[in-house]
Amino acid sequence: MWEKITRLFGQVDMTQGRPWEKIVIFTVPMLVGNIAQQLYNTVDSIVVGKYVGDNALAAVGSASPVFNLLLVLFVGISMGASIMVSQYFGSHDRENLSKTIGSTITLTAAASVLLMIVGVLSIRPLLVLLDTPESLIDWCTSYLMILLLGIAGLAYYNILCGVLRGLGDSLSALVYLLIATVINIVLDVWFVAGLGLGVSGVALATVIAQVVSAVLCVVKLRRMTELFDMKAQYLMPDRQNIMTVLRLGLPSGLTQAIFSLAMVVVQSLTNSFGEMIIAANVIIMRVDGFAMMPNFSFGTAMTTYAGQNVGARELERVRQGARQGTLIAMCTSAVITGLILLFGPYLMGIFTNTDELARLSADMMKILAVGYIAMAVTQSLSGVMRGAGDTVTPMWISLLTTVAIRVPVAYGLTYLTKTEELPQGRYESLWISLLVSWVLGALATFLFYRLGRWKKKAL
């Protein structure tokens, strides 16, 4: 059974065979992995909320956005390494492939030490600056301190999984994620419910699980000797490779950072509508996390697909795969949209016992539903451009739609809909603004893809 799965979903050379088939085969393990990742994070919240209390749950929730902001550098390294690896793999350039992987391993070590030192020294002042409540700040600090001290495990797992995907191997990344998920769940329950370690126990379980998965990634890469060499000479810092990794990857990291900051700005507007709207937004974002998974998975697959074929100088095949992959992604999102519209109230009811809240959340989700089809276009074609080496254009489109469109539209619509009966304006503005940014982002992405600037960005 495992041999059949390995043959079907194992390492994929996307420069050969039918494009749509290669894209789907590569995407399926990542999609399963994204679901596992979502469950991974959900279990942390369930365990700490159930066995420690609401304040502990709030502390973990408050710490997460701060931690995500600190990971910008690692997001950049992972994206840059994945693009370079896929292009050198596609061009069968063993020497540069070996240099890139070796430089990435060294760069990750340096970045981990830097973030550990800076993070440990600055985390509490940062939490104070963000007005973290006194009742939560000690828990937030201890939670983040443990994650930062074990940051190398998380960094190496995510970055080396990017390397594996660049080599066409999304199955190994999935297997290691599933192993990490099981370890995390078992240790969560043991540390928190059994040993009473509280929030610190959740953080410690996460670190251990990530270290195990990182070690598995290293072992896997050491065995791939038919593709590249992992020798000491390649671990020596190569300035050109490191600068190229950062040049290609940091726009993606910067995009995530500014996106997170924009979400914080909109959250303050959400809070002004009261507890019911805040709760509805939480439910919608949880459902959104699952609804967006196919789009993100296809986006990553298209990055690898484009990278390998650009490396092989198969631009016509890139265009063919872009059409087919985007169409499949749109069809997948259309199915999800239909399910959301059909089963919305029941789906929202999983998260709450309050019928009014479930109905409100379902109604607001209807506003967003068609936007997932637009996001399928954005993620797929952005993936193509990134894979070709053009990471700046998707960055600017994302920043434009998130900062220059979504935030002003949300505040503008809210202001324009204020009445005596609705002194805060209409809460629907929150989700209409998100839909507008998604649709305009898809149009801009399609336009820049058609202009073809990405074709000139190959390494």
Image (tube, grey):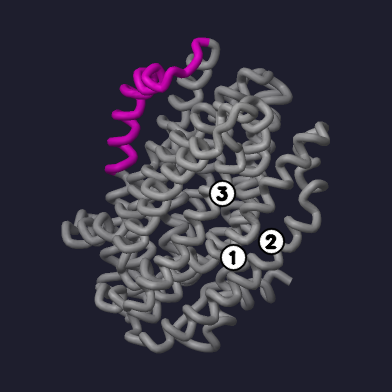
> Which residue is the extreme one toward the front?
420
**Badge 1, how many Cα within 10 Å: few under 14, some, many 20+?**
many
Tell me: 302 left or right of 35: left
Seen at 76% across and 43% down, the residue is: 348
Label 1 vs label 2: CA separation?
A: 8 Å
Quickly name the residue at label 3.
432
- For the residues labelled 2 and 3, the Cα–Cα distance comes to 16 Å
Task: Say which of marks 2 and 3 sits in front.
Answer: 3
Answer whether labels 2 and 3 touch (C-beta < 8 Å).
Answer: no
Residue type indicated by callout 1: Ile
Task: Give the quadrant of the C terminus.
Answer: bottom left
Instruction: Say which residue appears at 65% left-offset and 69% top-offset.
Output: 332
Nearer to the camera, 196 or 409: 409
Q: Which span is picked out in magenta?
A: 110-134
Above or below: residue 93 compared with residue 191? below
Q: Residues within 10 Å of mark 3 (few under 14, many from 20)?
A: some
Magenta stretch prevailing secondary structure: helix
Label located before the other in sequence (1 or 2): 2
Q: Is residue 283 magenta?
A: no
Relative to 238, is 331 on the left or the right?
right
Label 2, residues with CA under 10 Å away: few <14, some 14-19, many ≥20 = many
Give me the residue at 26% from left, 73% from top.
457
Which residue is denoted by mark 1 in the rendering?
Answer: 373
Q: Which residue is mark 2?
A: 337
Q: Decide which of tag 2 and tag 3 comes sooner along the chain.
A: 2
Most extreme residue toward the top is 134
Q: Amino acid at mark 3?
A: Ile
Mark with earlier residue (1, 3): 1
Say whether marks 1 and 2 touch (CB < 8 Å).
yes
